[in-house]
Amino acid sequence: MSNPKTLISEAEIKTRVDELAAQISLDYADKGELVLVGVLKGSFIFLADLSRRLSIPRHIEFIAVSSYEHGSVRSGAVRLVMDVRRSIEGKHVLVVEDIVDTGHTLHYLIDMLRSRGPASVRTCTLLHKEHRTEVDVEIDYLGFTIGDEWVVGYGLDYDEKDRTLPYIGAIEPQD
Ligand code: 5GP
């Protein structure tokens, strides 16, 4: 099978992650420890790179969700399958996503985390398919806006394949 065609190169990702980390470090300077909540599995590489480039105190947590499917069609309903380990009450929280597609996942996560009394909840996503939005969510830190194709690499998979590609590749247009 041939490699997916490059949509965003390794160098472009690195530059953008540096910029996001610099902005986040500035915005959260003097606010105490920032809790980074990575959404598994797709965000693990982005979170690893982003967190290492921050110049502020930070604590890493992970969360996992699954979308309900009817056949191959996602219903938009989201279910929590793994929660954070520490309380986020009174903390500044930054949700770190690989990609926002319809927005249902991030919408669910923001609501759930805000109900737990944090000091703040903001969002950071590497990719956003803005034309597929079904529910509006606030994205505070955005890497790249992309089209409707299915993307892999840098943590994102297609059926568990291509997660560890160093670049973002596009497979095929999405139906
Ligand atoms: P949403 O709830 O915003 O529709 O979907 C978000 C989730 O859908 C992402 O966290 C990711 O798991 C999955 N997803 C959506 N588009 C893509 C894509 O192009 N590639 C991959 N690997 N996952 C995607």
Image (cartoon, rainbow, N blue to C red):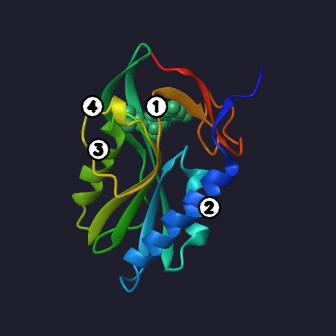
Q: Are marks 2 and 1 in contact (CB under 8 Å)?
A: no
Q: Amino acid at mark 3?
A: Tyr
**Residue to which mark 2 is pinned:** 49
Task: Please determine whether, in this image, residue 138 is positioned above or below residue 15.
Answer: above
Q: Are marks 2 and 4 in contact (CB under 8 Å)?
A: no
* SS type, badge 1: loop
State yes or no: Cβ of the residue under disc 4 lies below 8 Å from any atom of ligand 1.
Answer: yes
* SS type, badge 4: loop
In the rendered image, residue 12, in percent from the top left (x then y), is placed at 62, 52
Query: How far apart are labels 2 and 1 at the CA level?
Result: 24 Å
Please give the name of the residue rendered at 25% of the width and 36% of the height, measured from the top-left corner: 135
In the rendered image, residue 68, in percent from the top left (x then y), is placed at 37, 26
Specify which label sits upstream in the sequence, 2 or 4: 2
**Residue to which mark 3 is pinned:** 108
Q: Amino acid at mark 1?
A: Gly
- Disc marking residue 147: 1
Indicate which label's residue lies in the foreground, 3 or 2.
Answer: 2
Q: Are marks 4 and 3 in contact (CB under 8 Å)?
A: no
**Residue to which mark 4 is pinned:** 134
* SS type, badge 3: helix
